[in-house]
Image (cartoon, helix red, strand yellow):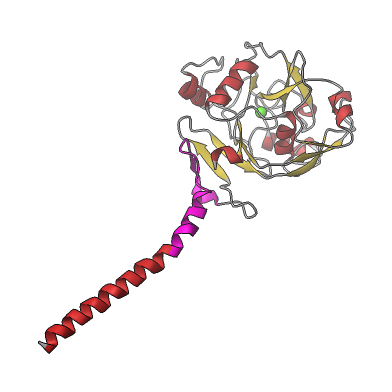
Amino acid sequence: MTTYRHIIFLIVIVVAFLSLNIDSVAPCLPSRIDGDENLLSSAYRAVESEGRDEINGLWKEIVHKESGIVLRLVPAGEFDMGSNSGEADEKPVHRVQISEPFYIGKYEVTQKQWKAVMGNNPGRWKGDNLPVERVSWKNAQEFCRKVGGDLPTEAQWEYACRAGTNTKWSFGDATTKIGEYAWYRGNHQGKLHEVGQKSPNPWGLHDMHGNAWEWCRDWYESNYYSRCAGGVTDPTGPGKGTSRVIRGGSIGSAAIHLRSARRHKNSPDLKDDDLVSFRVVIPAEAVH
Ligand SMILES: [Ca+2]
């Protein structure tokens, strides 16, 4: 009987011990919930091998599941926008604050990605991994909205293109290395090229210089920078206009037109330009 009591006593002790352990697990739950704040929206998945940003803890690279678009994290920060030695519309150089981190397409949007979202392929140059072209600004923006983002502002685009540099191109001031980083008039072979074949800029973005021009969100205004001379935060361009900004130059451009600060424009309705593509921007807070 004594042995029987001992067994009951031991069972009670074991159950009590297990209960204590279960209780001791409970305090861990809040930290898991904290971690959940960094989970991505269901439309995206993280490229875990790229890891997280050391400062803000956000995933450095994410993928839009439906289309396969890969986006890179761009940290908040500031930079000198424009060039005092370039075209008149690039002056004056002015300080720009980018107040929030954002994701931007690692590559120009491809024809395969466009088809996955829009169900058609307007491109003249056929190939799944070629940048999509012959898309109007409005069509490009419609695409961006469907994947939860937008076109980059002109400031976001130049910030991402410069990637911490203040040289003419993100690889320096000399054109000797341009063939390593860009498809342009000097090496185009008469066609657009599959995205991502050239070396990336310091922030891991490909083809910011050359291959296809890229739509930006802003209206184009030649003297807009003169109104930003004192420094601006998250500029979104003039409130109205007739043309939208395009950036980066293309296979039809001389090296000088691929400069980080070079500005150009197109009518937003124009949809037969086979050298204009775009990339997507998504605020970091929209996917986390
Ligand atoms: Ca480009």
Q: Is residue 87 shown above or below 103?
A: above
Residue at the spot x=35%, y=66% of the render? 22
Quadrant of ligand 1 in image: top right
Closer to the camera, 2 or 164? 2
Q: Quadrant of residue 154?
A: top right
Residues drawn in magenta: 27-51
Q: Quadrant of the C terminus?
A: top right
Q: Position of residue 181 (x, y in %)?
A: 68, 36
58 shown above or below 151: below
The image shows residue 78 at horizontal and vertical percentages of 77, 43
Which corner quadrant of the image does residue 133 belong to?
top right
Vertical arrangement, residue 241 with respect to residue 24, above or below: above
| Residue 129 in view, yes or no | yes
From where the camera sits, is residue 185 visible?
no
The quadrant of the picture occupied by the N terminus is bottom left
Nearer to the camera, 4 or 43: 4
In the displayed orientation, state which residue is furthest to the left.
Answer: 1
Count of marks, rendered view: 0
Task: Indicate the quadrant where residue 222 lies.
Answer: top right
